[in-house]
Image: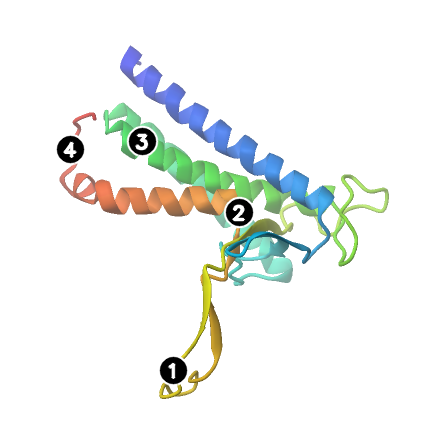
Amino acid sequence: MHSEQKKTWICASALILAILLVDQIVKFYVKTHFYLHESVEVTSWFFIRFEENNGIAFGLEFFKGNNKMILTILRIIAVGALGYYLHYVIKKKHRLGFVLSIAAIIAGAAGNIIDCVFYGYCFNSSIGQVAQFMPEEGGYAPLLCGKVVDMLKFPLFSATWPEWLPLIGGDSFTFFSPIFNLADSAITISVFVILIFYRQYLSDGSKDKE
């Protein structure tokens, strides 16, 4: 491996570790200091609200119960495939910005996988009580069946749909109401970076570095 490739690997690995570390520290703190559904207003447009979800991201629900294990396994397979792809783009000397974007997606996905694999086993979960780490009575779910911890909410503004709209006319709504975490943010931002700055790069296979 060339020295330039080694430097790229170091940068990508450092970014993955940094995102994972910050993501898990924040999740562990929220899990052990907030009770489920507790909300703290930081500003009128930013809340820290502790929620848990079974879904993909931003609180979306697709897999529940025993099927949650399927989602976790699919996530692990996806991260493995992305890890192989990261190795490929570094080997082919793709642009550093693109490499780091892939690394951030891997870190975000891995951060949520950690929740799914371990949090159900390591924590209890009940409304009105702060979760305990490694409780004597055991966790709330077996390995691979845990829930993802979310805590970031940005209700930027609220408004009312015009009366003339069918079905929803007159109903109030909040712009951007999903609750998410730092891992979700790393994935979403990286996808937008790739679509905005590297879409053509993906199609033409350019190998020029930044």
In the rendered structure, which amino acid carries the disc numbered 1? Pro
Q: Which mark is residue 181?
A: 2
Residue 84 at x, y percent in the picture: 37, 33
Contact between labelled residues 1 and 2, with CB atoms less than 8 Å apart: no
User: In x, y percent, where is residue 110?
Assistant: 51, 39
Label number found at residue 22: none
Q: Earlier in the sequence, mark 4 or mark 3?
A: 3
**Pointer 3 residue:** 99
Looking at the image, residue 122 sits to the left or right of residue 109; the answer is right
Q: Which comes before the other along the chain, label 1 or label 3?
A: 3
Q: Splitting the image into 4 quarters, where does residue 38 fall?
A: bottom right
Crowding at mark 2 (Cα within 10 Å: few <14, some 14-19, many 20+):
many
Q: Which residue is mark 4?
A: 206
> Tag 2: residue type?
Asn
Say which residue label 1 marks: 162
123 horizontally vs 25: left or right: right
* Residue type (three-letter) at the residue carrying disc 3: Val
Q: Which residue is at 78% across, 39% downward? A: 134
